[in-house]
Amino acid sequence: MKMEAKEKQAMSKRGKGIALAVITAVMWGIMGIFVRDLSNYRFSNIEISFFRCALAGAAYFLFLCVTKPSALRISLRGLVICIVYGAVAYSISFVSYSVAVSRIPVGVATVLMFMSPIWVAILGRVMFREKLEKSKIITIFICLIGAVLVANLIGGGEIKLDAIGILAGVINGIGVALQILLPKFFAKDYDRDTLLVYGFLGAAAVLLFGMDFGEVAVHFAAAPVTNLLWDLFGIGILCTMVANVACVKSTQYVEATTTSILSALEVVVGTLVGFFVFHEHLTVLQMIGAVIIVVGAIGSELVQGRKKQEGTQKEA
């Protein structure tokens, strides 16, 4: 009976971790709705990144004030670590993605970003000695093939590449990996919530140096108030605070590589948003790619879940 209870508890934890990773993918996937709207109001990529971090940090700070005040207590050394974490994982990642999409096709930038599971697998092995199982390595490459198809890199015409754009895309992929790995790395010394809230605020402080508030005021004046508030709520609360908190919390229950693989579902959600919201054309290859990603990511977790269950039964 005790082993059955232990097995159920383990499966419950894994289920929670998978659910949080899927929430992350959905929130990141719908972000294009809000970003495109703000871009239409002439907000720059740095301005959008700043509001993402500032709003997420402020909202999560207020949330923790009410629900978990202890998470806000931090030493000067800890604060510096959190700011560096925010600058590396968020500021550099967001800006490098902006540079990438401005110099190379969005599809290429997307695929480079979704090389993050590879970085997570490699760095996770170094930082946490996570086992690189064959099934996970195969899943990563299956999802990458799906991402290439969804990004329309095959049969989409001539692709012009730029060295700086490629480098920025690679840096972005590493940045996404660090968003998943660093909170887990520092979890022994710092609460994940502490890292998140001060990481958001630290990233906003770094991005502040690229802000022109005169231009921002012009953008605010030109945009309808209701639309603007909804877009800011979307990028700051839903697609940054909720998404990144869910992402980091996911690593409490499942391996970092698992979280990273499931985050690849963002590509599918983003493609569906493009099709249903923006009425973008979807080719047969893109649909096949989306199916490959879903089958690869979810199939991998079904296999891993069964292995965990069998392992628990053997222990019994």
Image: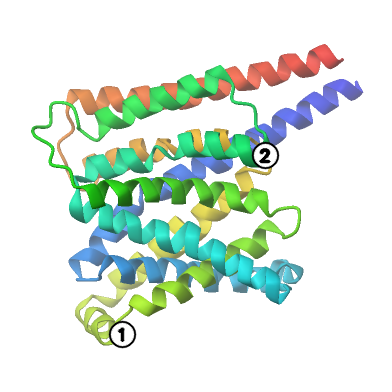
The Cα atoms of the two marked residues, 2 and 1, are separated by 42 Å
Residue 205 x %, y %: 47, 76
Residue at the left extreme?
157
Mark before the other along the chain sequence, 2 or 1: 2
Categorize mark 1 by other alpha carbons within 10 Å: few (<14), some (14-19), many (20+). Answer: few
Residue at position x 25%, y 71% from top? 43
Left or right placement of residue 256 versus residue 222 in this view: right
Check disc 1 and report its element: helix, strand or loop.
helix
Residue at position x 57%, y 20% from top? 302
Q: Is residue 166 above or below residue 298?
A: below
Residue 48 x %, y %: 33, 67
Q: Is residue 60 visible?
A: no
Q: Is residue 130 above or below residue 110?
A: above
Quadrant (top left, top right, bottom left, bottom right) of the C terminus:
top right
Residue at the right extreme?
2
Q: Quadrant of residue 85?
A: bottom right
Select label 2 or label 1 by which is in front: 2
Residue under numbered circle 1: 213
Q: Nearer the viewer, residue 164 or 64?
A: 164
Q: Amino acid at mark 2?
A: Phe
Quadrant (top left, top right, bottom left, bottom right) of the N terminus:
top right
